[in-house]
Amino acid sequence: MTLYIIGIGLESEKDISINGLEAAQSSSEIYLENYTSILQVQKEKLEKFCGKKIILANRDLIENKFTKIIISAKEKNISLLVPGSPLAATTHIAIFQEARLNKIPVEVIDSSSILTAVGITGLELYKFGRTASIPFNNKDVKTPIQILEQNQKINLHTLFLLDLAPKEKKYLSIKQAINYLIENKVSKKEKALACARLGCKNFVVKSGNLEELKNKNYGKPPYCLIIPSKKLHFIEEEMFSLWK
C-alpha cells in the first residue's frame, strides 16, 4: 500500500498527470490540501474528473492530524492532492519524511509550479535567486528586503510570493506588496514584473517600474511580483518590453 503525494498543477482538473490520476483512482481515500495556495478548480469538478470522493484538508488536518492518515497507508492507498508542485511547501516535505520514517511506501507525482511558471515572463529560470514571501502583517518584516539585496548583489532575479488566506478570502494585493517595498526604501523606479494567475489561460503579466505597476488592474489572485536582476540578457530585455 502507498501514500501518494500528487501535484495537481495551477489551473484546471486536467492539469493532473495521467500517473497522478491513476494513483488517485487507485486510492481508498483522497485528500485535497486547500490552504497553501488557491485552488483554481472546484472540488466537485475534480471529483467528477477523478471519479472519486475528495476530502478537503485544511491547515489543522494537514499539520496536526495527518499522522493517522499516513499510518493508514500501511493498509490502503491514500492520496494527498496538492495545488501546484507537491513538495513546494515544507508541510508536504514533513509528510513525506514522516511516511519514510514509518516505513510506509510514499510516491511523489510532480506537476507544474509557480517556480517554473514564471518562465512565461521571459526571465531565465536559472538566474532566479532565493524566493521571498511578503506576509500580510509586514510592518516590521525585513527578510524579503534582505533577500532582494542578496540576490541583487549577485545579479539574480527575485520572486516575491504574496500572502494569501483562501479560507478567509484574503489575498495580499500587488499594490500592497509594492507599497511594502517602497516603504522599505526600494526605489519607485525599480523595474518589476507584476503577475497574476500564472499557469492559467487568463494569466496576466505587466512590466514597468514599481510606481507604474502599483495602480494597475490584475484581476483575481493569486499574485506574485518579480524584481529582475540589474543586468538582463537581450532576450530578457525584449521580453520585459513585451509585457508593457
Image: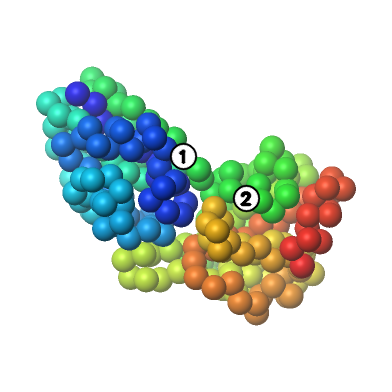
Which amino acid type is marked by label 2? Val
- Dividing the picture into quadrants, the one containing residue 70 is top left
Percent of width and height locating residue 156: 73, 45
Is residue 199 in sight in this rendering?
Answer: yes
Q: Name above or below for residue 102 compared with residue 233.
A: above
- Between 149 and 14, the residue placed more toward the observer is 14
Q: Name above or below for residue 52 compared with residue 170.
A: above
- Between 42 and 85, the residue placed more toward the observer is 42
Q: Is residue 44 left or right of residue 240?
A: left
Residue at image location 46% in from the left, 54% down from the top:
11
Near mark 1 (Cα within 10 A), the count class, few <14, some 14-19 or many ≥20, is: many
Q: Mark 2 — residue?
A: 118
Percent of width and height locating residue 108: 37, 31
Residue at image location 78% in from the left, 61% down from the top:
242
Q: Between disc 1 and disc 2, whose residue precedes?
A: 1
Is residue 61 in sight in this rendering?
Answer: no
Which amino acid type is marked by label 1? Ser
The residues bearing labels 1 and 2 have C-alpha atoms spaced at a distance of: 14 Å
Near mark 2 (Cα within 10 A), the count class, few <14, some 14-19 or many ≥20, is: many
**Quadrant into which the N terminus falls:** top left
Q: Which mark is residue 197?
A: none
Q: Pointer 1 and pointer 2: residues touching (CB < 8 Å)?
A: no
Q: Which mark is residue 111?
A: 1
Q: Is residue 42 left or right of residue 71?
A: right
User: Could you say whether the residue bearing mark 2 is in a helix, strand or loop?
Assistant: helix
Furthest-top residue in view? 103
